[in-house]
Image: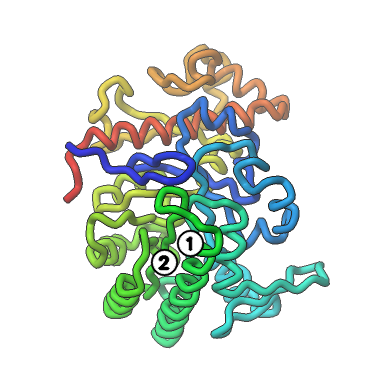
Amino acid sequence: MSERKLILPSGTLHYPVFLPDATFGVVRTVDSSDLEDVGVEGVVMNTFHLMQKPGSDVVRSLGGLHRMSGWNHPIITDSGGFQAYSLIRQNPKFGKMDSRGISFQLEGSSRKYQLTPAKCIQLQMSFDSDVVICLDDCTHVDAPDSEQRLSVDRTIEWAKRSKKEYLRLVEQKSLTEESRPRLFAVIQGGGIPELRRECAEALLEIGFDGFGFGGWPLDGEGRLITDILEYTRSLIPRHFPMHALGIGHPENLLACYRMGYDLFDCAMPTRDARHNRLYTFNQPVTAPQAGLTGSWLGYIYLNDEKHIRSDAPISPGCDCPVCSRYSIGFLRHLFKLGEPLHLRLATLHNLRFMTQLTKRIRSLPEVT
């Protein structure tokens, strides 16, 4: 089977790849050397948040995101479209979206922010991102048809303006094919297949290096909207990488890989770790393809009293720095003490689980 990968200025991402969320330039509780130790290939940072904290001027003065964070591997910067959705669509008093872009003011702050398609590209390229994502108008899958229609129209128009600014900056900076960041656009359309197709076709005509699935990917019951995810992937030729934005629950990652998605990011694995939910394989890690059918995913909860005297590792056969040295009982002891070390160790384990999972998935038959 031929190896599928995305070659970027700061390194290579091998599909499928899980990218932990380093929203403000850091994956909470761990540092860049920790990420390297557990096999993380790249991270996702967020333009919307970074422009506020520490601020775009500060990021640039600290040498860009790679130098600031000490992470010398690929960085994808999300545009902030989803954050605008969660902030403004659900709390209109905080700002507004119109044809020009997004304007917002956070609660308790007197400062007003403007995020236009062009500015979004300018910020990401000044941060030295490896993958730049166009500003998009995110919606919930259950939003009314009129809202989905407006979202698609805006997303297409913003993508055109983003591409124009991107090309201007590539020329201005004299970037080569090897040194230029890749430009991704996001496909919106909610749960309406016709709008998804319209958006995908328009973005393909504009021309991008890759694409993302846009909008909330879960239904009201918390289940993947499998039909729309699968249909959206079918609209994009297979040679283009496709990012399942915000999808990273282990079972959902596997399901979306089987649909043809390549890149995944989510805060869930690290958030679960901080809340003492640790991931395990129900079948041996030493058998790469085993355990990815049926009930292959298990959980360990550190607050469970049955672990008080357990001298076993979190997950037998796991080669993470935690399982190779510490027991569940010791981690539970740290948790009950309120010792911050348990947050770091739990996070390292869940991240290594995710990189082990993607490695195992690569041994599965290739998606065509």
Inter-mark Cα distance, 2 to 1: 8 Å
- Residue at 52 percent across and 20 percent down: it is 321
Q: Are marks 2 and 1 in contact (CB under 8 Å)?
A: yes
Label 2: element kind = strand
Q: Position of residue 70 (x, y in %)?
A: 63, 36
Amino acid at dot 2: Val
* Residue that numbered label 2 is attached to: 186
Question: Residue 139, can we see it?
Answer: no
Q: Is residue 197 above or below residue 238?
A: below
Frontmost residue, 126 versus 313: 126
Q: Please, what is the three-letter code of the amino acid marked with disc 1?
A: Ile
Q: Judging from the image, what secondary structure is the residue with disc 1 in?
A: strand
Residue 324 left/right relative to 317: right
Is residue 151 positioned above or below 365 on the image? below
Residue where numbered disc 1 is placed: 133
**Quarter of the image that includes the N terminus:** top left
